[in-house]
Image (tube, rainbow, N blue to C red):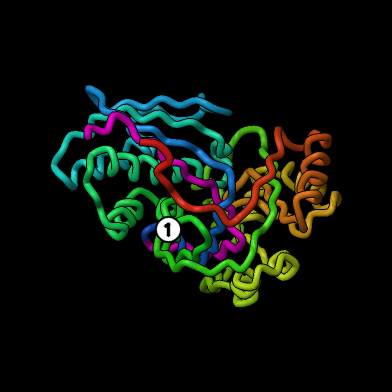
């Protein structure tokens, strides 16, 4: 049977812990990065074409690059090169993950395109092969393929999957404009100049809270070492964090490198209350409710 198109659904992520070490000689930072996949999704559809092309629809689609810098295009090229074939596909990205928001939307698209092309071309690549290509694409891409919860070490690309004993409810406040991840790391380095930055280590209390599904313990343990840098570059995020906390969020933090802010709440009713307060506050452009953990990249249509 000839496959005419493949659609893959792939989730956003929140970093429930992002511990950052000092800058390495290669410019990267060692991380202890605890990822949790959340139920906001992009859908990536690939079909045969005369050449590699990309289109994108959805919120802020105009901010998504439609050239070879897009991780979805790079994923198709890397997979094709490994198998000696031409990456002649049209990739369509239906965006629902905030763009440049610290929720790994671009990484999700890379993982989605990789799985979609592998399926379209009938390659049957192993999970290890796909994860190897994901790691070439970027630090967050392997987790977008895996989903659930995982500890990322190294640059974040070396994953250890984690057990999650329950479900968690989140609200995400989408800010106007994006924040450059390299700029946030640069600000982290500036703020820590002359400081001995400890080696990053995953919090045992946080890992235990995930394992047991204890939302109160998780709220006490979440942390983000990039938050001071993100707030330095975008001070207005402090107002958004204060609104969510005042509306009853159990924990409030910047998601990854920002500028999306994340609020852990007790249950669905609390999520709606926090989202309503955020929307009314004028401190963010939108507020989205999502559950976790979510599954990783999955083929949803062939």
Label 1 environment density (alpha carbons within 10 Å; few <14, some 14–19, many ≥20): some
Q: Say above or below: 138 vs 99.
A: below
Q: Is residue 190 visible?
A: no
**In this rendering, position of residue 11 left or right of residue 115:** right
Q: Which residues are magenta?
A: 1-25
At 42% from the left and 58% from the top, the residue drawn is 28
Q: Is residue 106 visible?
A: yes
Q: Residue furthest left?
A: 84
x%, y% of residue 132? 30, 57
**In this rendering, position of residue 19 left or right of residue 274:** left
Q: Nearer the viewer, residue 272 or 141?
A: 272
At 83% from the left and 34% from the top, the residue drawn is 280
Which residue carries the number 1 mark? 28
At 46% from the left and 64% from the top, the residue drawn is 152
Q: Nearer the viewer, residue 120 or 262?
A: 120
x%, y% of residue 164? 58, 66
**In this rendering, position of residue 287 left or right of residue 208:** right
The image quadrant where one finds the N terminus is top left
Q: Residue furthest right?
A: 246
- Does 42 lie within the magenta span? no
The image quadrant where one finds the C terminus is top left
x%, y% of residue 143? 45, 56
Q: Nearer the viewer, residue 106 or 22?
A: 106
Magenta residues: mostly which secondary structure? strand
At 34% from the left and 45% from the top, the residue drawn is 115
Q: Secondary structure at mark 1?
A: loop
x%, y% of residue 135? 35, 55
Number of marks present in the image shown: 1
């Amino acid at each position: 049977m000839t496959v005419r198109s493949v659609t893959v659904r792939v989730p956003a992520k929140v970093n429930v812990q992002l511990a950052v070490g000092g800058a390495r000689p290669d410019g990267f930072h060692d991380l202890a990065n605890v990822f949790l996949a959340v139920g906001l999704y992009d859908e990536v559809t690939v079909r045969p074409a005369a050449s590699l092309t990309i289109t994108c629809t959805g919120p802020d689609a105009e901010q998504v690059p439609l050239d070879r810098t897009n991780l979805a295009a790079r994923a198709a090229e890397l997979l094709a090169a490994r198998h000696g074939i031409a990456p002649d596909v049209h990739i369509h990205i239906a965006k629902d993950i905030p763009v440049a928001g610290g929720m790994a939307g671009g990484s999700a698209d890379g993982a989605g395109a990789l799985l979609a092309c592998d399926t379209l071309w009938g390659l049957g690549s192993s999970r290890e092969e796909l994860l190897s290509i994901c790691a070439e694409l970027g630090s967050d891409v392997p987790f977008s393929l895996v989903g659930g919860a995982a500890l990322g070490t190294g640059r974040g690309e070396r994953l250890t999957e984690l057990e999650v004993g329950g479900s968690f409810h989140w609200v995400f406040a989408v800010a106007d404009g994006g924040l450059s991840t390299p700029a946030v790391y640069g600000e982290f380095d500036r703020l820590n100049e002359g400081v001995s930055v400890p080696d990053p280590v995953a919090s045992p209390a946080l890992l235990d809270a995930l394992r047991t599904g204890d939302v109160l313990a998780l709220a006490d343990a979440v942390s983000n070492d990039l938050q001071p840098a993100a707030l330095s570059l975008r001070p207005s995020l402090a107002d958004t964090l204060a609104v969510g906390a005042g509306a009853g969020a159990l924990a409030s933090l910047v998601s990854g490198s920002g500028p999306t802010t994340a609020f852990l709440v007790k249950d669905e009713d609390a999520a709606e209350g926090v989202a309503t307060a955020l929307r009314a506050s004028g401190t963010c452009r939108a507020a989205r409710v999502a559950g976790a953990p979510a599954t990783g990249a999955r083929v949803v249509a062939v």
